[in-house]
Image (spheres, helix red, strand yellow):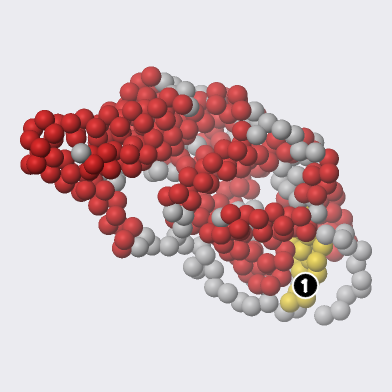
Amino acid sequence: MQEAALSLPSSATTVELEGKLIHIVGTAHVSAKSVQDVRDAVAAVRPDTIAIELCEPRYQGMVKKSAWRETNLFRVVKEGKATFLLAQLAMQSFYRRLGKQLEVEPGAEMMAGAACAEETGARLELIDRRIDITLKRVWRHLGFWQRIKLFGTMAGALFSSGEIGGEDIEALKQQDQLEAMMGEMGKAFPEIKKRLIDERDVYLAQKLRSAPGRRIVAVVGAGHVPGMLKAIREEVSLAELETLPPPSRWSKIWPWLIPAAVVALIAWGFWRGGMERGVDSIAIWIGVNGVLSALGAALVLAHPLAVLAAFVAAPITSLNPTIAAGWVAGLVQAWVRPPAVGDFEALPEAMETLKGFFLNPVVRILLVVVFANLGSSLGTFVAIPWIASR
């Protein structure tokens, strides 16, 4: 298929595929130049379809400012989704602070693509995988210590107050720098890169293959472009990438091995050491689990009743893999300090500062869940060898 040469921005790469001309515009998510590149590409191509690197939930969250107020926190906590929601907020917090420094709304280039579709009558295609599926696939493939390392990295990015220098800002806008950043992520967290970057490269490419129209402009992060170009020539089924992997047999068994080991150790203490030794073992289990879970909740300024709930729940929930101490503490926090509609609406602004992040009641509930759970998990790993050593 031949068309006259188009005056496209340097960030655009053209692929001819099965009767289609696909123009992939690689962008930085906080670059004013990227917004202009999108508009220039659309004006030059006059596409039938504009595809953007968003899924339906993320798109609705950007165009529907009231989306946060519809969040059911009780359901989020009870379904064990607090960690994933907090991770989304942490990522958005980083991008908002960076975007504020650059005076560009994060995701402005995606919204520019959507606006161009409305202005020109082009079809709008959302080609990214659902964010909840992506985060869950990442989480399920991480070991315990990898999860701890990830939390530390996220906390460092979230709580960092330093501004990015001018040279670094310009580097972030360059495709090769973005590729280098993803390469570094791959070294530190290979499983995260595989699920967060590599799988989505394939997913985005395959969604473009099936997108309608003869002329297509795709707006994606520049770091995805090399992987997409490798994957776009070969047809791949997306069924596996759109589903959560079933838990392995071992993952179903090991959560029950820990409580079984604890009960066995305590019973052994009663048998070998008598009543006093057995009671001491129970006291260690209750004290260590309860104190560390309560301490985790207290570190994020939980209500005293939520701290107490964490202390009481942790020794019990640690013996029952179907419930977690953080869920109990989080539900108590939501009950005694229920967030108002305004707290949900204030989330974007609250995430811009460390003080606002901690003081927002919505975020506080999520933090209580996560940190109470971390404390309880740490308590389990401390208490078992302590009891065994006696």
Q: For mark 1, does the 10 Å Cα neighbourhood hold few (<14), some (14 to 19), or many (20 or more) residues?
A: some
Quarter of image, res 22: bottom right
For the question of whether residue 356 can be seen, the reply is: yes
Q: Is residue 291 left or right of residue 118?
A: left
- Residue 204 lies, with reference to residue 282, above or below; the image says below
| 66 relative position to 366: left or right | right
The amino acid on which the numbered mark 1 sits, given as a three-letter code, is Val
Up the image or down, 365 lies above or below 105; here it is above
Q: Can you give x and y, in whole percent of width and height, for residue 168 in the image?
A: 79, 44
Q: Picture quarter containing residue 23?
A: bottom right
Q: Nearer the viewer, residue 175 or 67?
A: 175
- Image coordinates of residue 342 in percent, x first then y, are 57, 24
Residue at x-position 59% and y-position 52%: 56
| Residue 279 occupies quadrant | top left
Residue 125 is situated, as x and y percent measured from the top left of the image, at 67, 59
Split into 4 quadrants, where in the image is the C terminus?
Answer: top left
Counting from the top left corner in percent of width and height, residue 179 is at 72, 59
Front in this rendered view, residue 91 or 115: 91
In front here: 284 or 222? 284
Residue found at the very far top of the displayed protein: 304
Which residue ends up furthest to the front in the rendered image?
Answer: 389
- At mark 1, the secondary structure is strand
Q: Which residue is mark 1?
A: 15
Tell me which residue sits at (36%, 31%) in the image: 292
